[in-house]
Amino acid sequence: MRFQKKITNLLGLSVLAVFASSASPAQSIRIPPHEKIVFKNGLTVLLLEKHGVPIVSFDAIVKAGAAADPTGQEGLASMAAGLLRKGTKTRTAQQFSADMDYLGGSFGANASDDFTAISAEFLTKDLSRGLELFSDAVLHPTFPQGEADKLLAQSLDSVKGAKDDPQQVLGLYYNGYLYGARPYGRPDGGDEVSLKHINRDAIVKFYETYYAPGNTILAVAGEFNAAELRKKLEEVLGVWPAKSVPAVTIPATAPVKGRRLLLIDKPDATQTYFAFGNIGTTVNNPDRVAIRVVNTVFGGRFTSLLNEALRVESGLTYGVQSSFDLRKEPGTFGIYSFTRNETTVQAIDLALQVLQKLHKEGLTPEQLASAKSYIKGQFPPSIETSSQLARRIAQNEFYGLDDNEVNQLEARIDAVTPEIAKLVIQKHFPGDDLVFVLIGRASAVTHAVQKYAETQDARAVAEPGFWPPPTEKK
Amino acid sequence: MRKIWFRSIASLVLCLMGLAGTRGRAQEFPVQTKTLKNGMKVLVQSDHSIPNVALYIFYRIGSRNEHPGTTGLSHFFEHMMFNGAKKYGPGDLDKVMEANGGSNNAYTTRDTTVYQDWFPRLALPLIFDIEADRIANLSFDPQKIQSERGVVASERRLRTDNDNGGLLDEQLWATAFIAHPYQWPVVGWMSDIEHWTMEDLKHHFEMGYSPSNATMVVVGDVTPEEIFQLCGKYIEPITSHAPPPPVTTVEPEQLGERRLVVHKPAELPLLLIAYHAPKTNSPDFYALNILRTVLFQGQSSRMYQQLVDKEQIALEVSSFAEPAFDPTTEEIFVQPKQGVDPAACEKFVYEELERAKSTAITDQELEKAKNIRLVEFYQQTRTISGRANTIGTYEVFFGDFSKLFDAAKNYAAVTKEDVQRVAKTYFGANNRTVATLIPENEQKAKQ
């Protein structure tokens, strides 16, 4: 799964692994049985017993994420999530951490574009105390002023610190340049300007608007007795008062026409980091399995066409990959890599050639067969642990996908033919319309990269924000 | 921190930090072992919960076995192990493995080079065929050497030259060690990456890649019998030769604080502090882990409370020690906030260390640290891959995988006094090296 990991590292984005496949013909992989209960207050609860390791994993999804941030207050959903553990009706932030750490437990909350995810993990023997802590943070946060100020200041510095490492911010610039001010273009964690426009009142308002049982899915997986846990959950979470919540609407976005290029100057960089592509597709797209198969061949594994060309055969880079970030509305498709300043054009040219070749020649039956066994063979470890399973069933529920995402995937993968692959390439992989983002030493590459796009933009990494800055909206 | 170098970008943390329970022994899993006639030890743990297998091979060779002029050779060699042998030529290994549902990676540390295969059980014989081919018959194609040099240089630029943490860490170790080979970076100095030769590579292979210098760990949907049988067929016929010569250089005692500064354009400063610490297989290992947990782990830890929460001068503070054959370092990482003088962070770090020396930690803290260790044990061993890595790490660095199951007992035996004693023993001012990264723009503003 090294290239899956790479995507996360290179972009600082989490890539939703809703694609799946089945295992070897000998033993079909199925998602373990689990039950769904909707409490009277509207909370959706999914319970999956998995025995063998004495751990219980919680994964809650609140159906509002960074896409629900008001314009100019990017980072608001992240602040609300980050402050859940920073003070409750009965605990200060310090007490919460002390109680959590004493159990060896973990608690994290994080807003991505489509939703806010809250996860926690405890030993089975501590389940009651763990559940009490989890629900305390989710149901009773008080958002103390001092803690809000602290987290906002830390987040501001984190954005600046991330800019010291092009890998961490390449995806943020790419999304920003690709989508502009539309929801998926805005940084989930905010930027140097937007964070200054967030205050405690806005955070409280976000929480009060969106955090509600009817707007939340809770998945619990691990070693427990489902009937007993269900009772406990009803006691603790059944009392969460119901309320109506506005739906978050995200405008669908069509791919960009023509070509644009953004060059971000980082004068001390000894290599250029680049991303290019266009807007891709949705998580529910009927072609999703075929896209997964084609992208595996193209840029989704070590022996992909891209990695063979840019790394294995030429030594231009340590790694290159392509990925579809599939979301509720069309997410990004991108090709991502880095290379020496001097070989920037050589590497981008080569990647473009590989993309053109994909369109022209499609895939051979051998390439397809290899990708199919690769996906099937690598799938089982992705649903090995209770935390993986909790996350998967929670996200499937959120996106309206069912267990067949796992249970039928072997069949769905097998159904992908070279003809289907060809259609998928035409439909979902960009042709000439491309958006480029480069971070590097501008003086070393600015002239050479002019050939890629008629529209060119430039900015310095030290400039606040990503793209476009709130004050300079196009 | 960036001391582990991978063939590919996927990062995997070599965790040795927490493996145990509070009361009695943590969950055990049966491990079958066999030593092949050529000296390679094989450890097998059956787990049929998924139809997959994780196969790890640990070679006891890393950058500590190198010399000035060829630094980074172990890591480069790790890359070359994927670039062609007799039966599976250049590029074949990855293509065949992926076409059969498998994937691979590898990593190099100062002490070891580790190869990892993850695959469906149906690919078992193929994986053994591939592994045997490259251990017995690796080829050295001059063209591949040249292109892989570019790949490794790119990796170095990614993780060190364009990464402030990686850059400062490299300077820190080069300063903390003046005699022992731990002083040079695992990835190697750029000029060495550019200059090593075919002869250097061949010599490295002969030195480090004897089956007797390796340990294989197989975890997953297998039986010990079938693994031992496959080993008999594929691995056992490969003859062994002499292992790498022992590393005899002993780092002399540090007699005073060492400091270094890196100036470069940056948004945020950075602070790293290294204290010389014992090798992994030391009786103080457990007490040091408890101390680290109390000071650094979780938002209730003393350092987080002081630097991040109360004083609000740092964004992050952590500490770690990588598994090591020889005396190593306990390395403290502090990410100061923008505009904060790293010296201000230093002051609070030292105050907390002094407090740990002068007063014993509380019973509550001791209990908490042991609970954290227990959960970490389960988290590290709940996947076939994590278990393969953990079993192998214990076998290689503690000399016996079964020490893994004694860890609970060893942690339970740690007292508050032990923790105070190791704080006093290792965290003295004379024993530390301090590295700071000062953003150039801040420096100019001050002048």
Image (cartoon, coloured by chain):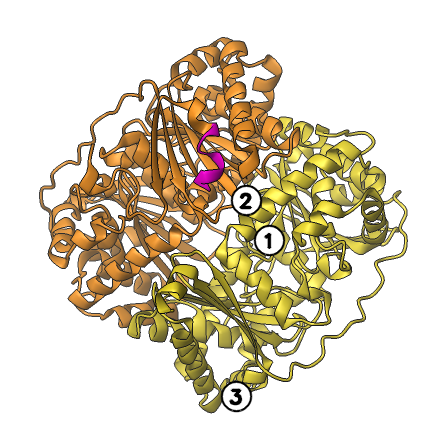
Q: Secondary structure at mark 3?
A: helix
Image location (x, y in percent) of residue B135: 81, 42
Would you say residue B397 is visible in this rendering?
Answer: yes
Image quarter in which the C terminus of chain A is found: top left
**Residue A442, magenta (yes or no):** yes
Give the residue pinned by disc 3. Answer: B417
- Three-letter amino acid code at the position of disc 3: Glu
Chain B tint in image? yellow
- Three-letter amino acid code at the position of disc 2: Ala
Task: Decide which of tag 1 and tag 2 comes sooner along the chain.
Answer: 2
Q: Secondary structure at mark 2?
A: loop
Residue B172 vs residue A11, the one in the foreground: B172
- Label 2: few (<14), some (14–19) or many (≥20) C-alpha neighbours in 10 Å: some
Whether residues under marks 3 and 2 lie with C-beta atoms below 8 angstroms apart, the answer is: no
- Label 3: few (<14), some (14–19) or many (≥20) C-alpha neighbours in 10 Å: some
Image location (x, y in percent) of residue B399: 73, 65
Q: CA distance from mark 1 to mark 2?
A: 18 Å
- Three-letter amino acid code at the position of disc 1: Arg
Q: CA distance from mark 1 to mark 3?
A: 32 Å
Vertical side of A287 occupied by B214: above or below: below
Determine the residue positioned at 41% across, 48% down. Answer: A387
Q: Which residues are magenta?
A: A441-448
Point out the frontmost of discs 1 and 3.
3
Residue A12 vs residue B298, the one in the foreground: A12
Task: Decide which of tag 1 and tag 3 comes sooner along the chain.
Answer: 1
Whether residues under marks 1 and 2 lie with C-beta atoms below 8 angstroms apart, the answer is: no
Say yes or no: labels 3 and 2 on the same chain.
yes
Vertical side of B86 occupied by A465: above or below: below
Give the residue pinned by disc 1. Answer: B387
Chain A tint in image? orange
Image location (x, y in percent) of residue A63: 22, 41
